[in-house]
Image (cartoon, rainbow, N blue to C red):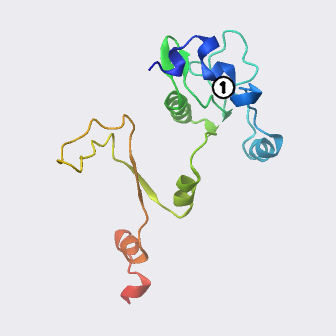
Amino acid sequence: MTHQSQLAPADNKFHKGNGEDQKHYWLTPPDVYAPLQEEFAFTFDPAPHPKPDDFDGLTCEWGESNYVNPPFGSIIHQGKKKGPTAWVRKAIEENQKGKDVVLVYPVDKWVLMLLKAGAEVRNLGDVKWLATEDGSAGKGTGRHIACFVLRGRKRAAQRNGKPSGRDK
């Protein structure tokens, strides 16, 4: 099966738009953007709409404070399929130059719940899960697996070198 990014625009679901309404550009609502703008005083949008001809947010220099609402699907960029990872790499690169970057991207609610609860996140890589039938390793999912760790108070205190309330 051919990936959407490899299809001609007429056959690509991202060019056709979403479902029945055929809309495919979605701008940040003012009530979401305004408080972020007030806090960060954005000076640059690396994923603007409408996109000026010959503008490339993945290769240009970003501003001192950047608001990034990137495409949520994959695109063809310089002949290669690029998706959210390309935007994250660029955001990190620009941040390492001392710039502020606010990048928005959809994630499942449960991820935000775990982060809010204080979960540590570890990258386990592309895990080759074992088959229940014979224990053989699979080929992996092609995606990295996140490990979320929620520590109990005692373990968290031990890790920080402090006695917990239960250790007294």
The residue lying at 44 percent from left, 58 percent from top is: 120
Viewer-side residue, 97 vs 46? 46
Left or right, 120 with respect to 48, comes to left
| Residue 44 appears in view | no
Describe the element under mark 1 as helix, strand or loop. loop
Which residue is situated farthest in the bottom direction here?
Answer: 168
Q: Quadrant of residue 48?
A: top right
Res. 95 image quadrant: top right
Query: In which quadrant is the C terminus drawn?
Result: bottom left
Q: Position of residue 11 (x, y in %)?
A: 60, 15
Is any atom of residue 50 visible in this view?
yes
- Nearer-the-camera pick, 94 or 69: 69
Q: Is residue 20 left or right of residue 122?
A: right
Q: Is residue 166 above or below residue 153?
A: below
The percent position of residue 166, horizontal first and vertical second, equals 40, 86
From the viewer's side, name the closer residue of 46 and 113: 113
10 Å crowding of disc 1: few (<14), some (14-19), many (20+):
many
Q: Is residue 77 left or right of residue 28?
A: left
Q: Residue at x 64, y 40 (%)?
A: 104
Q: Nearer the viewer, residue 71 or 97?
A: 71
Q: Amino acid at mark 1?
A: Pro
Q: Is residue 136 left or right of residue 66?
A: left
What count of labels does the image hold? 1
Q: Which residue is mark 1?
A: 46
- Residue 132 picture location, percent across and down: 23, 51
Residue occupying image coordinates x 54% and y 56%: 110
Image quadrant where one finds the N terminus: top left
Residue found at x 63% / y 23%: 14
Residue 150 x/y as whole percent: 43, 65
